[in-house]
Image (tube, helix red, strand yellow):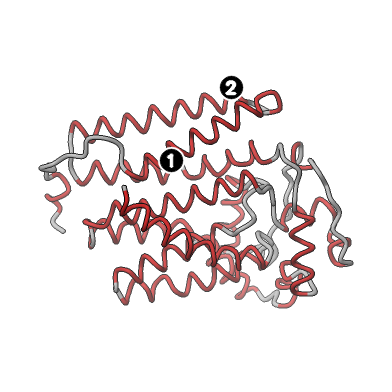
Amino acid sequence: MKKASLFTLDKKPKRGLLAAEWVIMGYLAFTLLMMVFMWPRLISPETMLLERCRYVVVTFGMWALYRAVPCRLTILARIAVQLGFLGWWYADTFELNRLLPNLDHVFASWEQSLFNCQPSLLFSQAIPDGWFSELMCLGYVSYFPLIATVTIYYFIQRYQEFEMATFVILTSFFAYYIIFILLPVTGPQFYYLAVGTENIAAGTFPNIGNWFMTHSERMAAPGWTDGFFYHLLEIAHNTGERPTAAFPSSHVGITTVLILLALRTRSRWLVLFILPFFILMCLATVYIHAHYAIDVLAGLATGILFYYASCALYKRI
């Protein structure tokens, strides 16, 4: 694609919001409704409301920019802004789901019944080697670079499907966020610390109720603590991790969506580039205590489901 084409004005500029922006507006309305019912129990409802106002202002500001200069570059900027907000929306799920009773004891019990152990507790103990730890951390921190890779590939190589691809990615994200709000599961890194690994090893999974209403401490990730990718992982966790979003694994689910989008392009190099990271992601989420193994299985299933459902929905819009 020639550089000049970035600034070529669209002959038929889009009048309203992009399909993905409408989906996120729907999610915003859903969370506002929840806030109305939960208002007296929310920790900082005024701040949450103010942040939503900021989001609306920025989104319509980007729409106005596109209307002033309707070209590929401003379309890319609109999508980039929505991707940039994902971290904030993720943290926001914690503000709502911590008001509901924690369900980790249920999912840890299912894990024990299915595998007769806790894979997240034992995986890193079975393979503690530094090189393997670094591979796992690399897989996990590749998450957002993979999203950027697929997004940019569609923008450059398959621009006619760019809006569809980003719609599928963003719609899948917000489908997961709805689940995370309504299904408060924090994952091993938070639950194991809260109840003690000695209880977990003994197969005891206490119900901790509203523990995470006032606690957000997590276990440090296992592995080679001097590793480069381990440090990147810790930076990412310290910056944006919250006791939320364990079931299903959105890391696995979104990466599944990405591999399906890559397959759609029929680009061998893109598929071969993403595939190793996809495999590492499935393993890494359990290795670093971020998820139960059943979260990974659910992530694979829902990733496929959300991909095809989002594609079908886009055709109807």
Please name whichever residue, 302 or 226, is drawn nearer the observer in this view of the structure: 302
Q: Nearer the viewer, mark 2 or mark 1?
A: 1
Question: Which element is circle 1 on?
Answer: helix
Question: Which element is circle 2 on?
Answer: helix
On screen, residue 148 above or below 27: below
Mark positioned earlier in the residue sequence (2 or 1): 1
Amino acid type assigned to the residue bearing label 1 in the image: Ile
Which corner quadrant of the image does residue 315 belong to?
bottom left
Residue found at x 69% / y 51%? 186
Which corner quadrant of the image does residue 216 belong to?
top right
Outermost residue, front side: 316
Which corner quadrant of the image does residue 39 belong to?
top right
In the rendered structure, find residue 261 and report the number of the disc placed on it.
Answer: none
Residue found at x 84% / y 53%? 195
Please name whichever residue, 99 or 223, is drawn nearer the observer in this view of the structure: 99
Residue found at x 51% / y 44%? 87
| Residue 105 falls left or right of residue 286 | right
Where does the image place residue 188, in percent across and percent down from the top left? 73, 58
In the rendered structure, find residue 46 and report the number of the disc placed on it.
Answer: 2
Residue found at x 45% / y 38%? 26
On screen, residue 190 above or below 200: above
Amino acid type assigned to the residue bearing label 2 in the image: Glu
Specify the quadrant that holds the N terminus: bottom left
Give the Cα separation between the discs numbered 2 and 1: 20 Å
Where does the image place residue 268, in percent across and percent down from the top left? 31, 77
Please name whichever residue, 107 or 7, is drawn nearer the observer in this view of the structure: 107
